Image (tube, grey):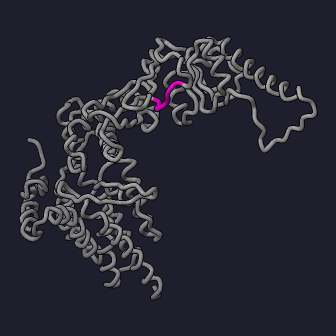
Amino acid sequence: MDFYSKLTQYHNITAAKATAGIIRTTLGPRSMLKMIIDNQGGIVITNDGFCVLREIEIGHPAAKSIIELSKSQDSEIGDGTTTIVVLVSEFLRISEILMKQKFHPNQLMASFFQALVDITFFLENNLACRLDSKNFQDMIKVIMTTICTKLVGKFSRLICELSFKAIVTSKSKIENYNFNNLLKIEKIPFGRFEDSKILSGIMLAKDISHPKMRRKIINPKIILLDCPIEYKKGESQVAIEMVDENDWENLLKAEENYIMFICTLLKKFKPDVIISEKGVSDLALHYLYKSNISVIRRIKKSENLRLAKATGSTIISSIEDMEFNDLGKAGNFEVKKIGQEYYSFITGCNESKSFTILLFGPSRDILDEIERNLHDALCVAKNIFSNPKVIPGGGATELAIGNFLVKKSEEKKNNSFFIYKSLALAFEIVPKTLIENFGGSVVYPISQLRSIHRKNGFFFGFDGKKWKNSRYKKN
């Protein structure tokens, strides 16, 4: 391998280590918060690893790969975004040392993949404990391990109960639908967080378009539109030349007639609520109000799709081609004023495939952090329901893996012996980081934990809140 190839490899490793160094202090219950100014000039205060990395502008490809790895962990697992970055950077650090000792990268990768197979087998058979998914208290404790180290740890119990209830409510539908499409988190900067709840239906941060339209309707018929209820405008700038004074009146009359024609078509289906992604003209609002129809306009495409799933309606792109079976139904439509804003609630749908978690709080910044933590809790709850197995925390798993690799290395020959030994030391970075973030000395606690794990005390780890070694297994 030539000099420049080695130099490139070392630069990649240095970039990965620098990225991990940014968020290493955000690991564990004694982690520190990071204050970041985002692209819009707002301030983000968090100790979520992926949230910190997401706000940083990095140009190095190796560092970008580390951030993408953290993003995948956040979207699939929900927790461990900091741990995985710290571990990867440590693996790269020992790889750098081994390459300087004339180990080839392909040889390192082969041993790493073999170690992955051995570790997975060891975790499945020696460390993983199966939970009873019907035991509410045990499930809540597992989810709390994700939240208790965060900024809003004070509300960890409430967040866990919300996520648990949300997964239980939509459990039967998770297998057939995308998890992110089923549940939507809506933030309302008003009231107390204790008022947060799960809504079986959809909330829109929109008011009705006419002040005199009905704000509460029982068993409404709903039409969803993907087209405007107004006169069609030209694709580009249009110039109309008029030679007679009556031409202007005729033009306005043509527009009015077209809008009346569209409103007449809609009235034929006798809907109670019309919701459109596009605009609705003032004249159309007047005619629809006279027909006792409530209108909400300019909603997001994603909200319209969720409404279609919840109400069983079809999104209409052409009003002229509309049929009676395109209408949707709901149990209740209501517009409420919360704080200074109006919100529309569509609930009681017979084929409800959408749920909304309403978060209340004093400010947008706090609600943003609560939303990030709730997302993590939801992902963990979903995973624990699909595969109810847990492994010990506090660095116990990493130390157990390290002890296992040391024993496994004695069976290896040639260079694999040194690679397994190095990997065993690399896994100790997690308990070391937990101890460092507590503010104590690493030497004595790690030595004590190593001694316990040599005697097969696999479930002992470091308690980052009480500064002691604890057993992480329920008898």
For image coordinates 35% across by 38% down, the residue present is 189
For image coordinates 46% across by 56% down, the residue present is 40
Would you say 366 lies left or right of 179 here?
A: left
Residue 23 is inside the magenta segment? no
Q: Quadrant of the C terminus?
A: top left
For image coordinates 17% across by 57% down, the residue present is 30
Residue 250 percent across, percent down from the top left: 85, 24
**Whether residue 266 is situated above or below residue 397 in the rendered picture:** above
**Can I make out residue 128 in this image?**
no
Q: Quadrant of the N terminus?
A: bottom left
Tell me the chief SS of the magenta region. Answer: loop
Would you say 389 lies left or right of 16 here?
A: left
For image coordinates 29% across by 75% down, the residue present is 94
Residue 6 percent across, percent down from the top left: 42, 83
Magenta highlight range: 204-208
**Whether residue 284 is situated above or below residue 237 in the rendered picture:** above
Residue 457 percent across, percent down from the top left: 9, 56
Residue 206 is inside the magenta segment? yes
Would you say 206 lies left or right of 264 here?
A: left
Q: Which of the 4 quarters of the picture holds residue 431?
A: bottom left
Residue 434 percent across, percent down from the top left: 18, 61
* Nearer to me, 401 or 20: 20
**Can I make out residue 385 in this image?**
yes
